[in-house]
Image (spheres, rainbow, N blue to C red):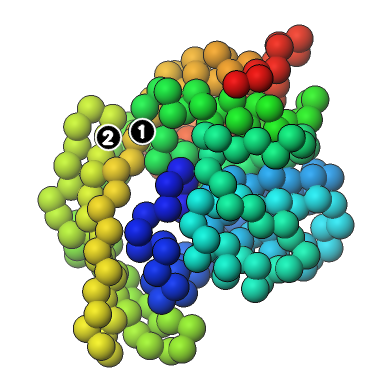
Amino acid sequence: MSGLHADEAYTDAAFVRLYDAENPWHPMDDFYQRLDRAAASVLDVGCGTGTRLASTRETGHRGRLVGVDPAEAMLAVARAKAPAVEWVHADAQSLDLGERFELVTMTGHAFQLLLDDDAVRAALAAFRRHLAPGGLLAFETRNPAPRPWATWVRDETLLQVSGTDGEPYESWVEGPVAHDGDLVTFTAVVRSLRSGREWTTSSTLRFVDPSHLEALLGEAGLVVGSWFGDWDSSPLTAASPEVIVLARPSVGARRSAS
């Protein structure tokens, strides 16, 4: 998850090498890759280290695949994985490739790094201008209704992983987590168990209510065709962990030039 602006830690090559270990292939990736395979061209905004698009290419996709991320260190890893995918250094709000795609995605909860309505509007306008007529926008955000941040404590989030060189690391969320309206701010720590080196990052995420999200999508000329609550395509309910959105351009809507 990279989102809008590269956190300082994501410019550290050693830290970035741990990203894939902490974020292995997930049912989320299966969900989005099924959409990739059904589309002739794919734009993935906030692609991180490019695992999904690299796999999509390796498993036979022959169309246009473009990954975008604001962190050059992440893109360096992505380029090494799949030179046949196009990797672009850019952010979600100002992105303008002058091209359209059948599928535009933003995954890994990167949408939650859009911290106010203006940021969401700018990103949705960018997604809209990159969608081909009848194209599909797919993204997800964590559902605020179950208050997932309440479990973001060290004991619940402690994870041990091995880096690409076999070096052991542990990571966790360091409390307290601050909840202010629809914004949640927390500190994450990654520590090398061999050297003791630590990386500490502070992040703020926005938890958008689905009804408000639908209104913002409508403003951008996008209509939600499907809401899902988890990666098995189950319906969205108050208890669902995810708010997964599949939306298309409104019929007859004027394409935003912003």
Q: Which residue is mark 1?
A: 115
Indicate left or right for 20 with 100 as reference: left
Where residue 44 appears, as percent x and y from the top left, is 64, 47
Query: Nearer the viewer's eye, disc 2 or disc 1?
Result: 1
Q: Is residue 110 above or below residue 83?
A: above
Q: Residue at x 50, y 70 (%)?
A: 20
Indicate left or right for 182 with 251 as reference: left
- The amino acid sitting under disc 1 is Leu
Q: Residue at x 61, y 66 (%)?
A: 78
Q: Nearer the viewer, residue 115 or 240?
A: 115
| Secondary structure category for the residue under label 1 | loop
Where residue 168 appears, as percent x and y from the top left, is 34, 85
Q: Residue at x 52, y 61 (%)?
A: 72
- The amino acid sitting under disc 2 is Leu
Is residue 169 at least partly visible in the picture?
Answer: yes
Q: Is residue 172 above or below residue 32?
A: below
Q: Which residue is mark 2?
A: 183
2 and 1 marks in contact (CB < 8 Å):
yes
Q: Quadrant of residue 10?
A: bottom left
Q: Nearer the viewer, residue 96 or 118?
A: 96
Q: Quarter of the image for the C terminus: give it.
A: top right
Where residue 5 appears, as percent x and y from the top left, is 43, 47
Q: Nearer the viewer, residue 256 or 206?
A: 256
Where residue 58 appears, as percent x and y from the top left, is 77, 68
Neighbourhood count class around disc 2 (C-alpha, 10 Å): few under 14, some 14–19, many 20 upward: some
Mark 2 to mark 1: distance in Å?
A: 7 Å
| Secondary structure category for the residue under label 2 | strand
Q: Is residue 244 above or below residue 200?
A: above
Q: Is residue 53 above or below residue 118?
A: below
